């Protein structure tokens, strides 16, 4: 059959909206009709060509919500009509990673997903006989997409897909990094570097964790109003303090450093600052941002010897099939507020505008409707 999709034919070029061919689901696979998708910084990173794993041509997109249209042979956990959020971090529940109880990084489809292919090493997308890659196992910039069964969280049908799609990446990543990875404790002081969708979700998570002080840091002061609305107690623009390294400024503001910090940019220099603004003896810093190919982090090892801890977090440490349905319920009860993130809405035909708004720092999340 045909599907209307935004195709990334090559790095650095706008997406092209066109009808492409999509094959039906094979064994263990599911055809999903995407209703809405967010546009995340990571899509832009891959489109730019800086992503070492980026493959072209591809159908990008990984923050979607949709409805199951058809299931392949052997699929038992979802059925046509189910409402779903595609997962770029699958959950097979049987691999060594899933059963470890220590990580959400299921490896069942990791190898083929990284090659832009379905688990049988082929693609369901093509145009005029030319193969088009999948992306992150989700490819939500297409009205129809095929994903592995283990890459779908089944959610409450009453949830608005054009909002809860944001739980497919950004909001879950930020809140999860606070609650699952750092396990922020009540009364803590938290520093958040970068106030895009991820950083704002970290602020929301820190409020949920009852942090006492939340310091929001960005070089774009246009981000501060929303950060304050979401619960930031202090906003700092490093460019207003050019003579003082940002880590020193935060240490001075907090009587020795923060209990927890989160890097939500993908800048290795800021990752260092985020670690070094943590309190001696116990401060913990979580890297969420994805840095460019070949970049490396550094600090003086004595920073760690003296008790600071460096961690990383992928998809907020959340096991998608098990935990995401509950987060959708939290959003429906108003315990997770998704509205502040949605600064723009537009149809697929205008998706390149969503990328421009992101690059200009004018949007948090644009939701694309199909
Ligand atoms: P975004 O571009 O919307 O936000 C980044 C923010 O950082 C912007 O507000 C920008 O002004 C600010 N910034 C840039 N340079 C800065 C600096 N030197 N100091 C302070 N602030 C600075 O991006 P996003 O969608 O929020 O994503 C943030 C990062 O998280 C990206 O690297 C993305 O790839 C990554 N990400 C990681 C995961 C994960 O699971 N680990 C999931 C999703 C996204
Ligand atoms: O299992 O090796 C692995 C990788 C899992 C992917 C984790 C992705 C986290 C960061 C990517 C940004 C997501 C939008
Ligand atoms: Zn697994």
Image (spheres, rainbow, N blue to C red):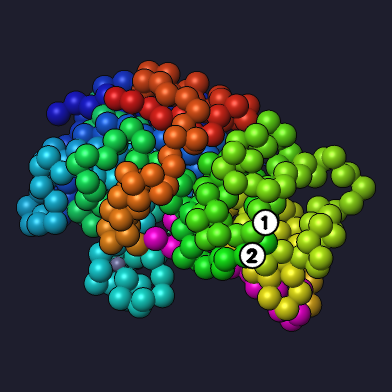
Residue 249 percent across, percent down from the top left: 84, 55
Ligand 3 is found in the corner quadrant, namely bottom left
Q: Does ligand 1 reach within 8 Å of label 2's beta carbon?
A: no
10 Å crowding of disc 1: few (<14), some (14-19), many (20+): many
Give the number of callouts: 2
User: Does residue 30 appear in this view?
Assistant: yes
| Image marks 1 and 2: residues in contact by CB distance under 8 Å | yes
In reply to whether residue 313 is colored magenta, the answer given is yes
- Neighbourhood count class around disc 2 (C-alpha, 10 Å): few under 14, some 14–19, many 20 upward: some
Between residue 337 and residue 290, name the one nearer to us.
Answer: 337
Task: Decide if residue 298 is in sight here.
Answer: no
Left or right: residue 37 compared with residue 263: left
Q: Quadrant of the C terminus?
A: top left
- Which region shows up in magenta? 303-318
Residue picked out by circle 2: 188
Q: Is residue 176 magenta?
A: no
Is 232 on the left-hand or right-hand side of 339? Answer: right
Say which residue appears at 62% left-offset and 41% top-offset. Answer: 227
* Left-right relation of 33 to 49: left
**Looking at the image, which residue is at 85% across and 40% down?**
240
State the image coordinates of residue 246 (x, y, percent, origin top left).
Answer: 81, 53
Seen from the viewer's position, the closer of residues 338 and 81 is: 338
The mark nearer the N terminus, 1 or 2, is: 2
User: Under tag 2, what secondary structure?
Assistant: loop
Tag 1 residue: 213
Q: Could you tell me residue 225's position as x and y percent?
A: 65, 34
């Amino acid at each position: 059959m045909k599907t209307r999709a935004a195709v990334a034919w090559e790095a650095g070029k706008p997406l092209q909206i066109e009808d492409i061919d999509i094959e039906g689901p094979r064994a263990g696979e599911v055809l999903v009709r995407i209703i809405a998708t967010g546009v995340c910084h990571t899509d832009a990173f891959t489109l730019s060509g800086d992503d070492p794993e980026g493959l072209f041509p591809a159908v990008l997109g990984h923050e979607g919500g949709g409805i199951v249209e058809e299931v392949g042979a052997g699929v038992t956990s979802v059925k046509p009509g189910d409402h779903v959020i595609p997962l770029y971090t699958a959950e097979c529940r049987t691999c060594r990673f899933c059963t470890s109880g220590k990580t959400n990084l299921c490896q069942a489809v990791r190898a083929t997903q990284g090659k832009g292919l379905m688990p049988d090493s082929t693609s369901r997308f093509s145009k005029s006989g030319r193969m088009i890659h999948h992306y992150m196992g989700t490819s939500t910039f297409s009205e129809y997409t095929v994903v592995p069964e283990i890459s779908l969280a089944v959610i409450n049908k009453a949830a608005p897909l054009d909002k809860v799609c944001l739980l497919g990446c950004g909001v879950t990543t930020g809140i999860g990094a606070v609650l699952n990875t750092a396990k922020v404790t009540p009364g803590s002081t938290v520093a958040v570097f970068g106030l895009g969708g991820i950083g704002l979700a970290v602020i929301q998570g820190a409020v949920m964790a009852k942090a006492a002080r939340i310091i929001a840091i960005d070089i774009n002061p246009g981000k501060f109003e929303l950060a304050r609305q979401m619960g930031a107690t202090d906003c700092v623009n490093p460019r207003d303090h050019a003579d003082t390294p940002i880590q020193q400024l935060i240490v001075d503001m907090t009587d020795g450093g923060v209990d927890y910090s989160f890097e939500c940019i993908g800048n290795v220099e800021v990752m260092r600052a985020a670690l070094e603004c943590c309190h001696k003896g116990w401060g913990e810093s979580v890297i969420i941002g994805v840095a460019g190919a070949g970049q490396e982090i550094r600090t003086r090892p004595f920073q760690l010897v003296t008790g600071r801890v460096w961690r990383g977090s992928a998809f907020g440490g959340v096991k998608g099939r098990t935990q995401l349905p509950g987060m959708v319920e939290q959003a429906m009860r108003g315990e997770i507020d998704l509205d502040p993130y949605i600064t723009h809405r537009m149809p697929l035909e205008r998706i390149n505008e969503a990328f421009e708004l992101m690059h200009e720092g004018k949007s948090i999340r644009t939701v694309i409707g199909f």
